Image (cartoon, rainbow, N blue to C red):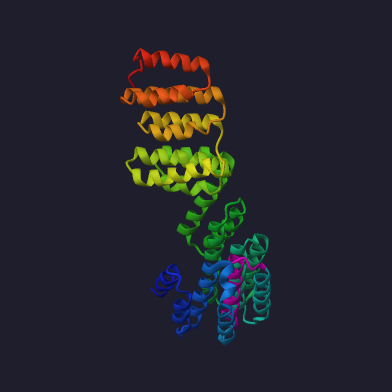
Amino acid sequence: MMLDNIKALLGKGDVDGALKLVLSLKDRMLKMELLTYMIQELGEDYVEYPILLSESLATIASLAEDRDKVKALALLSYALASAGDEKKAEKFIKEALSVAKKIYYPIWKAEALAYVAYYLGLIGDTKSAFYYFNIALETLEKSNEVYSAVLPVMSLIADLSLEVGDSLETEEAIDFYSLSRQIYTSMKKFVSASQVEEKIHMVKEAFKEGSLAVKRALEKGDIDRAIAIVKYLSPEEKVAALLDISYWLFLHEREDLARTLLSDVFDIMLIKKIKPNDLELFVVAYKFIKIGLLDEALTVAGVIEDVDEASKILSEIALAYARFGNENKALSIAEAIQNEAIKKKLLKRLGGEDVGYE
């Protein structure tokens, strides 16, 4: 509820109002979370409100437990990194690690190290994150505490490692998922372990098969899996996969979502100049023709570089427009075709009204 209020105020540009609300809070950890949220949202402009950093540091200093200070310092580091202030982010993550290492009680030390590892992972230092997750786990394993006391922190390490894995778009995600699965299995949380195992399989499939993995998921009707795989693909494969997903959405009567997605994909292709190969574009354009999405097919055809392939699909689009009675549009497309043989054949068919019946 409080976060929603802060979001609403920041959305209106009322930073002072948001600050006033946050500074009135008595719950110090909630106050810390909201201060760092504001830093992230303001980005580089956070420096215009020095009270954000000073209040964050004052809040950290007021925390009684060192493990809470570690979590707050690591959170502040992450927020500053998100805002582009890498120098300060590095300073505070080092301070968090220093405090964590001095904690004597092993369970609290392991918890603190787990949060350092978590925020290191979110910042992008995955090598250090994986290392400190393992150090946190070793700290627990070497302690003489009863299993019931160790269990919650073991679960925390597994959960945080899983979250880092979810945040990654590289094969490094497998390392964090594997650690999480290992811990869940040792705790006999077999359902959780099985779910993580599925994530590992998905990542491996994505890097091995690329956009083909998305096609396979769509063939099985698993749209959620198809979407989840997309983030692991190369930029070109990602565009191809999103085109396939938008086509699937059209077929399954989710037109609003399909058009929103397709609009984003067209922006990527036309503005950022990122696109799949011509063969994949040809296939997608032809699929759109088959379900009557002629304007969409025309846009896809427009980014095909090979003149002959572009001419072939443009010819099919022109014939489709003619079948729908839009002869002017068909002729306009025909005149733009660069392959003269295909253009001549198409104009002959259009003139003779032999446009086929699909």
In magenta stretch: residue 250: no
Please report the bounds of the magenta region as a residue range. Answer: 66-86
Front residue of 95 and 295: 295
Rendering quarter of residue 333 = top left
Q: Look at 52% across and 78% down and name the residue there.
A: 32
Q: Tell me if residue 111 can be seen.
A: no
Where residue 136 appears, as percent x and y from the top left, is 62, 70
Q: Look at 42% across and 23% down and name the residue there.
A: 316
Where residue 263 appears, as percent x and y from the top left, is 44, 44
Above or below, 121 relative to 299: below
Q: Look at 51% across and 71% down and name the residue there.
A: 37
Above or below, 233 relative to 39: above
| Quadrant position of the C terminus in the picture | top left
| Quadrant position of the N terminus in the picture | bottom left
Rendering quarter of residue 119 = bottom right
Where residue 256 appears, as percent x and y from the top left, is 35, 46
Q: Is residue 134 left or right of residue 324?
A: right
Where residue 105 appears, as percent x and y from the top left, is 62, 81
**Magenta span: helix, strand or loop, mainly?**
helix
Above or below, 307 relative to 9: above
For the image, the number of numbered tags is 0
Front residue of 76 and 202: 76
Front residue of 210 and 113: 210
Front residue of 273 and 334: 334
Q: Is residue 42 left or right of residue 263?
A: right
Q: Tell me if residue 149 can be seen.
A: yes
Q: Look at 31% across and 26% down and name the residue there.
A: 324
In magenta stretch: residue 76: yes
